[in-house]
Amino acid sequence: MDKTTTVAFVRVEGTLVDRGVLSASAYIASNGQGLSERLLRLGQVALTAPVYTFLGQNDRVLANRLAYVAARGMSDDRLAVLGEEYFEDILKERILDSGLDLLKKAKKAGHQIVLLSEGLHEFVGPLATYLADHLKMPELVGALVCNQMEYRDHEASGRLLDPVIGGHDSGRWATKYAVEHDVDLAQSVAYGAHGPDMLLLATVGKPCAVNPDFTLRRAASQADWPIMEYTL
């Protein structure tokens, strides 16, 4: 039987919003319960930032693990509240109009949409809910694949559960997803913005680099993939 389902894999960071993991991590740290706690958490983010920038092109899994150490010790309820506040205070204003157009275009083309994010569910879940309401696309609520924090007795361990989203295994993940959901990857599309996204883009027949960083831009040029630029 021919596969009839096609997917649009859409990377959230850099494609739909212009804020990433370090922004969320800094927000978490700046909302510690006391001055000493805030200073400690902000210090962790400050130390992590240059390492994340370096690793982000090479080992984004480790980079993401390091970025979320700042959440260690926070309760699940507290992180849920911070996630809602972060969306309202910061992320909502950083949604890219051209990114919304990509989602509309994907739906019009009949693709099933899958949103891929390095963010914690508590922080990007409100975004998916907003997009579902704003675009009248309720399916987006269940279309989000993102990182999950490990909790022990309702307290964040600072460790991400496997699999960590955003690394070089995104291509293998997409292939597995296609097998499980009977997806025709040759007729599917993918939008990515970062170096590690190149393996995701390589799995589909219609890849597109959006506002790509240096690594992805070079790979897209070599592979002759379309490159889309729009204002951040």
Image (spheres, rainbow, N blue to C red):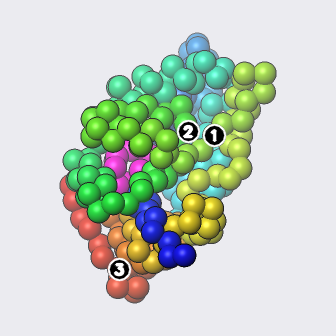
Q: Amino acid at mark 1?
A: Gln
Q: Main secondary structure of the magenta part?
A: loop
Q: Is residue 58 visible?
A: no
Q: Is residue 102 left or right of residue 180?
A: left
Q: Secondary structure at mark 1?
A: loop
Q: Earlier in the sequence, mark 3 or mark 2?
A: 2
- Distance from label 3 to label 2 (Cα)? 30 Å
Q: Amino acid at mark 2?
A: Leu
Q: Is residue 96 left or right of residue 200?
A: left
Q: Secondary structure at mark 2?
A: strand
Which label is found at residue 178? none
Q: Are the residues at dot 1 and dot 2 in contact (C-beta closer than 8 Å)?
A: yes
Q: Is residue 137 visible?
A: yes
Q: How many marks?
A: 3
Which label is found at residue 148? 1
Q: Quadrant of residue 61?
A: bottom right
- Distance from label 1 to label 3 (Cα)? 31 Å
Q: Which residue is mark 2?
A: 120
- Distance from label 1 to label 2 (Cα)? 6 Å
State the extent of the magenta-drawn residues as a range.
12-20
Magenta stretch contains residue 17: yes
Q: Secondary structure at mark 3?
A: loop
Residue 226 position within the rendered picture, expressed as x and y whole percent measured from the top left: 30, 76
Neighbor class of circle 2 (other Cα within 10 Å; few <14, some 14-19, many 20+) is many
- Kindly give the residue lying farthest to the top in the view shown: 34
Of the pair 170 and 34, the residue shown nearer to us: 170
Q: Earlier in the sequence, mark 1 or mark 3?
A: 1
Q: Which residue is mark 3?
A: 225
Of the pair 25 and 92, the residue shown nearer to us: 92
